[in-house]
Image: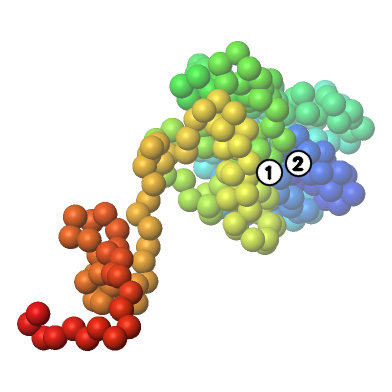
Amino acid sequence: MRLLIVEDEKRLATTLAKGLAAEGFAVDVAHDGREGLHLATTQGYDLLVLDIMLPGMNGYRLCGTLRAAGDETPILMLTAKDGEYDEAEGLDTGADDYLTKPFSYVVLLARVRALLRRRTRGGSPVLRLGDLTLDPNGRRCARGEEDIMLTAKEFAVLEYLASRPGQVVSKAEILEHVWDFAYDGDPNIIEVYISALRRKIDAPFGRRSPGHRPGRRPPARRSHRGRRRGRGRRALHRHPAGRGPIHRPPPVAGVRRRCGS
């Protein structure tokens, strides 16, 4: 799941981003309303955490602009205002929930998960691929009746892939959804996590990765030089039935072979 935090208090934004990232979310951060609007309209997010008092464009206007454009992404509003009219205005502009500062991180995390569950209402929250089940709400993965322990990032990668069964997913798509917008590391990190997932969800249960054919080995590669030698002089010394090389007797001293004898 990918989240966007639009909060001008940089220390609070950083703290929230680190906490949510530790829960397996990919988190982007913007510190003013215009930057937040740009990211919200050009990137794909599953939820927005939006402060009201923002420079450039306040949260009410940002939320209203998104809703007017038909964007139905869940929005959790944060504000230092605790008046009932302020809360009503936030909800009237299209926000899905409202949290007053100061707040407990535990409560914010619970609100975030509740909004994400509400977004998927009407469909099964549990993802199933054969006997592999993935419960995003309970953060639980199991093969049959046996639970599988995954790290937060492993769970996020598997959740993204499991939600797109039968589709070809590129590294760029996984990075965009599971890692944050500012990630500029090696994209091969995806292969590291895929390998780790296979060791946990496939190998212990006798599963094999797609494309592997049991009981067959790929043909050995031979060099060009080896193939020439196989067709040339060495081939003359092979037994015609293919049972290995012919061992010629050593020459006897003093005996000379005559041509035609």
- Residue depicted at x 60% and y 13%: 145
Left or right: 248 with respect to 196? Answer: left
At x 59%, y 50%, the residue is: 190
Quadrant position of the N terminus in the picture: top right
Image position of 198 with respect to 187: above or below: above
* Residue 177 drawn at (x, y percent): 59, 45
Task: Name the secondary structure under disc 2.
Answer: helix
Quarter occupied by the C terminus? bottom left
Query: Few, some or many C-alpha atoms within 10 Å of disc 1 (few <14, some 14-19, many ≥20)?
Result: many
Crowd band around label 2 with a 10 angstrom C-alpha radius: few (<14), some (14–19), many (20+) = many
User: Between 162 and 177, which is closer to the camera in this rendering?
Assistant: 162
Residue 171: mark in rendering = none
The tag on residue 26 is 1
Which circle's residue, 1 or 2, is located before the other in the chain? 2
The residue most toward the front is 254
In the displayed orientation, state which residue is furthest to the top: 145
| Along the line of sight, the residue nearer the viewer: 68 or 144 | 144
Residue in view at x 23 percent, y 56 percent:
242
Amino acid type of the residue tagged 1 in the rendering: Ala
Identify the residue position indicated by label 2 in the image: 21
**Left or right: residue 33 compared with residue 132:** right
| Quadrant of residue 253 within the rendered picture | bottom left
Give how far across and how far down residue 225 sits, in percent. 34, 77
Q: Secondary structure at mark 1?
A: strand
Q: CA distance from mark 1 to mark 2?
A: 6 Å
- Given the current orientation, which residue lies at the most extreme right position? 102
Q: Is residue 232 visible?
A: yes
Q: Position of residue 32 (x, y in %)?
A: 76, 53
**Is residue 137 something one can see in this rendering?**
no
